[in-house]
Amino acid sequence: MPGLIHRRAFFAGTALAVSAPSLVRAQTWPSGSIRLVVPFAPGGSTDLAARLVADGLAQRLGVPVVVENRPGAGATTGSQVVADAAPDGQTLVMSNIASHAISPALYGNRVRYDPVRSFTHIAMVITNPSVWVVNPRSEIGNLADLVRIAKTRRGGLDMASSGAGSSNHLLLVRFSEMAGIEHTHVPFRGAGPAMTAVIAGQVPMMSDSLPSAAGHVRQGSVRAIAMSSAERHPAFPDVPTFREQGFDLVSTSWFALSGPAGLPAPIVERLHRETMALIATPESRQRFAELGGTPGDMTTAQFSAFVASEVASWAPVVRSSGATAD
Amino acid sequence: MDLFANLYLGMSVALSLDNITFALLGAFIGTAIGVLPGIGPVATISLLLPITFGMSATTAIIMLAGIYYGAQYGGSTTSILLNLPGEVSSVVTTLEGYKMARKGRAGAALTIAALGSFFAGTISTILVAASGPLLTSVALSFGPADYFSLMLLGLIISAVLAQGSIVKAIGMVVLGVALGLVGTDVQTGQQRFTFGVPELSDGIGFVAVAMGMFGIAEIILNLERPESRSVLTNKVDSLWLTREEAMRSIAPVLRGTTIGSVLGILPGGGASLAAFGSYMLESKVSKYRHEFGTGAIEGVAGPEAANNAAAQTSFIPLLTLGIPANAVMALMVGALIIQGIQPGPRMVEAQPDLFWGLIASMWVGNLMLLVINLPLIGMWVKLLEVPYRYLYPAILIFCAIGVYSLNNNVFDVYLTVAFGLFGYLCSKLKLEGAPLLIGFVLGPMMEEHLRRAMLLSRGDPMVFLQRPISATLLGIAALALLTMLLPALRKKKEAALAEG
Amino acid sequence: MKINAKDVASGALLIAIAVAGLWLNQDHTLGTARRMGPGYMPMMTFWLQMGLGAIVLVMGLFNGPDKLDRWAWRELTLILASLCVFALLLEQGGLFLAIAATVGVASLGDRTHKPLGVLGLIIFLMALCWFVFIRELDIRVNLWPSFF
């Protein structure tokens, strides 16, 4: 195994892909390694998705694409770094529903960037719905049961999520308003501990992202009662949607590729094309399917419009949830 | 018996050339990054993640597990040699380990850390193999109220870590809890005590506090008293354990292994209690407890064994429930999911070679650690013979780069400066850092479990007494508080009488 | 009455931090025991800390004597300053410049240093850090100054 001896290649994987430094900058993009900022700590689903993208882009562009984790402040710290970076295509961000839809409303004027205008939105990578899961021994079989039981308890039903202000939490808020029930939100530090509490029966239900819940649902350690996609999810055809059960709720979480505002059109076009090709390979499709995600299929214009619509639709939900960062 | 057939299957997987090579490589990389202050296994594993895409799932997880326990071990090396703890468990190792190094017994401290860890790793691996699926119910039987009581017990006994006044130590624990409050409130998302600084919104980093209060403050103190550091550099005795040291270590290692194995199973933060739980126990039951604080080998042997045992048994919730106990394990789950494998109850049947291969490779990995580290001990000890005027700038640089690389942010370096100053102030006032760090780590978990328990009980505090686990833990906590305070009060009284 | 100045100062320090904490905590809602607000735990923590600080302070009035130690201002300032220099220079000035400046400032803290030794140490650390952090660990940081 000669690869083991030279550990730079081993560590950075793609770091040696290019050796000759380019003298020309603007004309010959990409020049040198590209930073892909992930505004979360290593190990989360955004980080995993980013590493898949970085690996694929590096092969296609022929330069190293290095993931840089800049966690903090609801994913706004890392996004700010990219908003402030030069629009030369060397610095990109794994934008997502937290950094570009929810946190700007949650953190208010302490977020200095505009989620739409401070960025060039390049390509949607993965979208995935939320899924509501209950303990398999629970008497809750569908949303109607859930509403009925919630009305009999003081303080309503205990509902777990991966954290205050997450899209999963906000889905709980929207649902409770729509169904006219009380609920006691039980936030956890991440999806893992919340899932433990549902499996152990300490909390009756949880609203989770499909990627982190998929394996538990498949293994039967929890039961899925509702999916927040518009149609039934192909990987889970048995799980009915909210709409089917009479609640007009669709909520999709997403990870995407964005860069600083004013990125030259040829760079955007190339990055969009390569990313789309990358997520269309059977290998990526299979990996995304394991994560419970759907590869994105939007043009850059559609994606920019999508971000704007997300910002507009989440702001009132954040306000009514009572979650705040101030 | 099934167990032996399974272990045989596991060994045949773990001992294949590929897997043994990657176990060795993982253990080596883990040790190397564990030695570097600040650079943790999380960053390294995420860096290596793309490389694992091309490996078989078994090989990938074996290498990542090797990094994990290699890093656990490497961290104790810098704690013993340089008073630089990179994580919670290493804070405990500094207490006696660094004192031993100053007495010229750095080699012995490193040797017992390696041997104790290996022994604990062997026992707890057998435990995981024999009863992993059964122990799952232990992990699930702990509710928020029980975790709260466990954390409270941990905070109370952490005052024992102090060599001086108990009241001052409890004061430092509480101050640590207060520092842990800085950042975003988990329940409401509100910012607390962040002064509008975005870098503080995720809380104060543990490494910045630990490096500042221990490493940086120690450098200033060493520069201030040139006579004391000559002790450090000039007197390095034999590397091997004396017969007496070996005999003294046996019981602490056994007790540490037991404590660590039990606490490691709990995914809600149990493993972080293992090392100092063992230290606390040794400082109470050891025949040599009067030597604690001056470099007692029991204070290294027990906690190191406990820490490693906990690192092994914390795989139980991961393998049987698919629940990661910490950030490193979350990454391992990610690596497996990318390979199309979901860890969980069905993994034992669906992927027996992966499951048993991993368990066998834990033991193989521990053996590798021993093979890598025992010969290195001589080299590490030689490091102490480098004149201190060359050593301390190097420590400063390594700390600074390590702290910076945590979040790629210089703010953490400034934070380290602030805690260096605070650590110096504390040592001038005989306020001790270890209780503060324990409070800092356990405080946020305790608040989280307290609020969740109260939320679920609809505000009824009786839940802490109604649940048998919680009630038992609270009883032990009350008892511990009494036994700590009574001797102190009695001593005061005697002193007062003698004076009068 | 034998005053333990260290304990009195420790108690005062704990009380001062607790008072500051309680003052800052006024911004946070306390909530109820059932649904504790963000201010509940800080309130309990700081009151406990204040109580403990008071005990330490009062006991310090009697369990002395223990004077305050002198501070090594020169070493303290130089070491902390050297780390600040590192933080200031790293992102714009690059790793090599930051190492040189940090070691330069820190070495003033030990009077036995000689210029040649410091220079050798700087070069050695540059090489070592390049190897460990850049080549092996691939940390994202500039090597050379970027402000030209």
Image (cartoon, coloured by chain):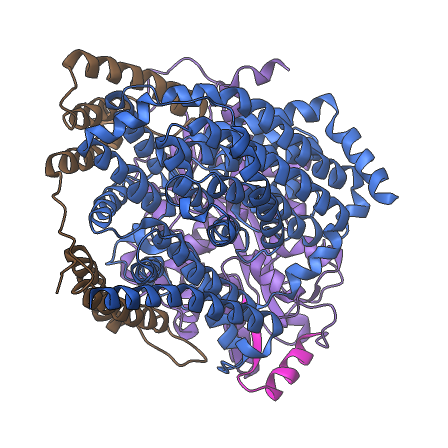
Chain colours: A purple, B blue, C brown
In the image, farthest residue toward the right = B1
Quarter the C terminus of chain B occupies: bottom left
Identify the image quadrant of residue C146: top left
Q: Is residue C22 left or right of residue C135?
A: left
Rendering coords of residue A142 (x, y %): 70, 74
Q: In the rendered view, would you say B399 is above or below A160?
A: above
Viewer-proximal residue among B149 and A56:
B149
Q: Is residue A113 visible?
A: no
Q: Is residue A148 left or right of residue B116?
A: right
Rendering coords of residue A91 (x, y %): 37, 35
* Residue located 55% across and 48% down the image: A45
Q: In the rendered view, would you say A150 is above or below A211?
A: below
Magenta span contains residue C114:
no
Q: Is residue A290 left or right of residue B477?
A: right
Viewer-proximal residue among B372 and C120:
B372
Q: In the rendered view, would you say A92 is above or below C58?
A: above
* Residue located 26% across and 28% down the image: B229
Q: Is residue A147 visible?
A: yes
| Residue span colored magenta | A142-160
Rendering coords of residue B45 (x, y %): 53, 35
Rendering coords of residue B199 (x, y %): 31, 50
* Residue located 18% across and 11% down the image: C116
Magenta span contains residue A144:
yes
Quarter the N terminus of chain B occupies: top right
